[in-house]
Image: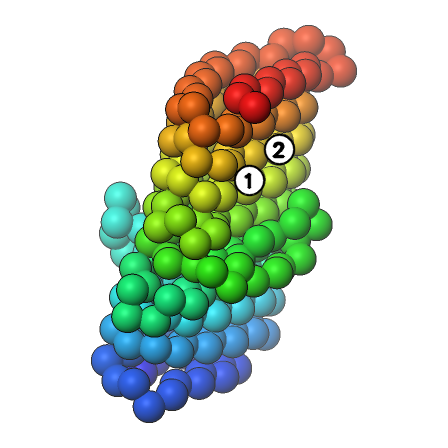
Amino acid sequence: MIRLLSLIKISILIAFPALADNLVTINQVSSGSSNDITINVEGKDNEVNFSLGGGNNTINIDSVGKENWVGYTSAWGSGASWGGDLYGSYNNVDIRQSCSEGANCNGNTFGFHISGTSNTVAVGQGWDVSSTGSFSADTDEYGGQTALLDIHGNSNNIYLSQRNDDTNGTNTANMYVYGSYNDVHVSQKQAKQTLNLTINNDYNDVSIQQRNNGQHTANITLSGDYGTNLSLIQQGGTNQSYSLSQNCLTSGGCSVTVTQGQ
């Protein structure tokens, strides 16, 4: 089923195979032009549901499997009343979900609440996303990944990949980026990895990797007058945990490098 509500100058390509009960709902809630939306949904009981405001946005959603969700977040609900779940101009959003295990697939969930201009977001669930935003598929994937993204600033580059590599691992990333000019690359692989990331300032360069069979957890908040270069790796078969509350007041910026596990 497809529901397109109050669409204004939006080009959409939607491809559905024979399996039923997929639902796409897109609601344009404010005037905008030259938005380019491409949606591909394959499988069963998948849903894409979001509201859109602003113009010159490019959105690609590729959801393959069963019981996947892409749309507004469970935490805030629909953003239609305040301008849209994605509003602003010149944002580029690419969301890809996949599962290769047929009836054994678990649903992936991605929720966005985005405002601002010129943000680039590339999220792969069942995909690997490089630090430059390129995608490569995981061909042994059970799904079950969860990502919650909230961006209020401008000119942020966010690249997130979640894979379980034939392990039945379910990874969770809660990412809130309220500043501008931040570069964030997060990779979660294999076992049950959890990340809670909040960025309250500008010009941070963040690289986070959580991988292998340990169940790793990271809780990170970045603030201050200057940005922080953060590199965090949590790996190995032993559970790792890391917490950081960084308020950078050093002219020229701060730097934090942490590696945990073997």
Left or right for 31, reference 2: right
From the image, which quarter does the C terminus lie in? top right
Callout 2 amino acid = Ser
- Residue pictured at 40% horizontal, 49% vertical: 167
Image height of 151 relative to 27, above or below: above
Q: Which residue is mark 1?
A: 186
Residue 165: x and y in percent read: 47, 52
Q: Position of residue 245 (x, y in %)?
A: 47, 14
Q: Residue 202: tell me if it is visible.
A: no
179 shown above or below 35: above
Find numbered disc 1 in the image and state the secondary structure of the residue it sits on: strand
Residue at image point 46% right, 77% down:
40
Estimate the spatial distance between the alpha carbons at disc 1 and disc 2, rounded to whole Å: 6 Å
Nearer to the camera, 74 or 153? 74
Left or right of 16? Residue 183 is: right
Q: Nearer the viewer, residue 121 or 155?
A: 121
- Picture residue at 51% right of the left edge, 76% below the top: 38
> Quick one: SS at disc 2?
strand
Give coordinates of residue 137: x percent, y percent.
56, 62
Residue 207: mark in rendering: 2
Camera-side residue of 150 and 153: 150
* Residue 179 location (% of width, % of height): 55, 33
Q: Which mark is residue 57?
A: none
Circle 2 Cα neighbour tier, 10 Å, few/some/many (<14 / 14–19 / ≥20): some
Asked whether disc 1 touches disc 2, contact meaning CB atoms under 8 Å apart, the reply is yes
- Residue 248 visible? The answer is yes
Q: Residues within 10 Å of mark 1 (few under 14, many from 20)?
A: many
Residue at 29% x, 85% y: name it. 19
N-terminal label among 1 and 2: 1
